[in-house]
Image (cartoon, grey):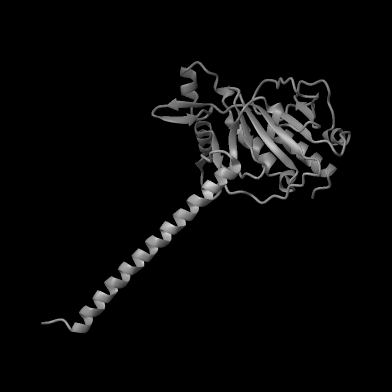
Amino acid sequence: MVRPLGVKKSKKNRKKKEKYDREEDFQEETVAEEKYDEILEANKAEKGEEVEAAELSGIPVAPSDPNTRKPGVIFILENASLEVAKVGKNYQLLNADDHANFLKRNQKNPADYRPDICHQALLSILDSTIAKAGRLRAVYVKTQQGNLIEVKPHVRIPRTFKRFSGLMLQLLQKLSITAVGKREKLLRMIKNPVTQYLPPNSRKIGFSFSSEKLVKIRNYVDTVGSNTDLVFVVGAMAHGKVETDYTDDFIAISSYPLSAAFCITSICLALADKWDIL
């Protein structure tokens, strides 16, 4: 039986239409790629530097409203346990729970490998009303190995420790993490010392349970001038004392040992009360 002429003709027209659509889509994709390359080159020329960093999905830029005329706060997390090692066939961020046997075989104390302390401290800082009001200027993390990390105040840190470990692993290997859909570096490795990034008129305050100067944090921040930026140095390790040579004062805010996250929360609440942030 012979097929009707109309059916065969319709099939041929459909093939032509599909071919035309594919060619049109290919042209649109080519134009889009050319425009993207032009924008990327323009950004490189404007900034005067190469924009090469690893992109990590799931870290969007949070909205913020920074006001540079008002005083702000900077946090420095000292002695953070962020060390990468090859465990088996893969590189991993060492922690006491998952790598206890590996650490003991290499004659290392598992209690010294607590990256979860840094994770909790960063969440306490970035979740505070200080950060949401745009008064958080920057966050710096100094590792036990002496590496210095800059954390932008509008970054969203992963909520789970597993994703945080993957983020830190990628950061320590590729030196920077960029925002999704943008070329802004949200986390990056920078050169020491940290003092070169601090405002010249800032007051640098260290925290330790062993300090003889016990103060009430709300009363203490009231004594600081209204035009002075505050820099708080908090230890991000399980044991030990923060020893720095750039702090102007060294205080304790409780007669009991406090976690880094609780200490930071107390600071943020006191500053929010001082600056009338609700």
The x and y percentages for residue 131 are 71, 44
Task: Count every numbered label the image shows and give the total.
Answer: 0
Taking the image as shown, residue 221 lies to the left or right of residue 192, namely right
Q: Is residue 181 left or right of residue 78?
A: left
Q: Position of residue 209 (x, y in %)?
A: 75, 24
| Residue displayed at 55% across by 36% down | 176
| Residue sitting nearer the eye, 86 or 101 | 86
197 and 229: which is toward the camera: 197
In this rendered view, identify the residue nearer to me: 74 or 182: 182
- Residue 179 visible at all: no
| Image point (84%, 35%), residue name | 221
Instruction: State which quarter of the image contains the N terminus.
Output: bottom left
Q: Where is residue 239? Give x, y as percent.
A: 65, 22
Give me the residue at 76% from left, 37% from top.
73
Q: Is residue 220 above or below residue 211?
A: below
State whether residue 189 appears in this view. yes
Find residue 124 and report its image quarter. top right
Q: Quadrant of residue 237?
A: top right
**Left or right of 188 on screen, residue 72:** right
Residue 217 image offset from top left, x and y in percent:
82, 33
Q: Is residue 140 above or below residue 19?
A: above
The answer to whether residue 27 is above or below residue 180 is below
Horizontal placement of 12 versus 220: left or right? left
Q: Quadrant of residue 46?
A: top right
